[in-house]
Image: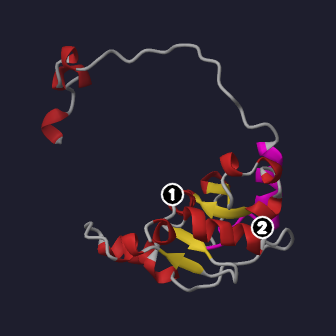
Amino acid sequence: MAQLKGIPPEALVPPEIFPEGKTREAIVKTRVNQAFFRSAVLAAYGCKCCVTGLSIPELLTASHIVPWRSDTKNRTNPRNGLCLNAIHDKAFDCGLITVTPDYRVRVSNVLKKSSHSGDNIRQSLFLKYEGERIVLPSRFLPDAAFLGYHNVHVFWDARKN
């Protein structure tokens, strides 16, 4: 890395190989009242991830149990939310982990059997939470029916059977 000091980035790779990065204006859909949902969920959990206890607000997400696209009536219902850190939110959204109706973490077989390198990281981020009870919120207890939906329709193991 020391030999690269002082060399401008554009000298490292010829720019004609890659398309030019540009900016354009776009009309996008915005989730209205998402801020209410986030505030209610994070406050209910005391701004701590219900799986790991991480308490850095910038890394916390109000994760929908039943996905936003799947249930218009419960999009802003705080009982349809869990406070998760960014990596567990992503794993929850794509079904690599779930929370059972009795509030326990389940880790998918995809993560359990993964041949990816970094087994120590996988262990510390996911496997050690298998069967552990989440920290419950002070109010807006996650609805067991919503958790059941996630277990059946989102959780990887249920979708692959």
> Element type at marker 2?
loop
Task: Report the quarter where the N terminus lies.
Answer: top left
Residue 105 lies in quadrant: bottom right
The residue wearing badge 2 is: 46
Q: Is residue 45 left or right of residue 123?
A: right
Residue at coordinates 65% horizontally, 19% vertically from top-left? 27
The residue wearing badge 1 is: 94
- Residue 120: tell me if it is visible: yes
Q: Position of residue 110 (x, y in %)?
A: 38, 70
Q: Which residues are magenta?
A: 34-51
Task: Report the quarter where the C terminus lies.
Answer: bottom left
Q: Is residue 134 left or right of residue 138?
A: left
Residue at coordinates 77% horizontally, 44% vertically from top-left? 34
Q: Position of residue 152 (x, y in %)?
A: 59, 69
Q: Is residue 94 magenta?
A: no
- Residue 54: tell me if it is visible: no
Give residue 18's mark. none
Q: Position of residue 51 (x, y in %)?
A: 61, 74
Residue that protrudes farthest toward the front in the picture: 161
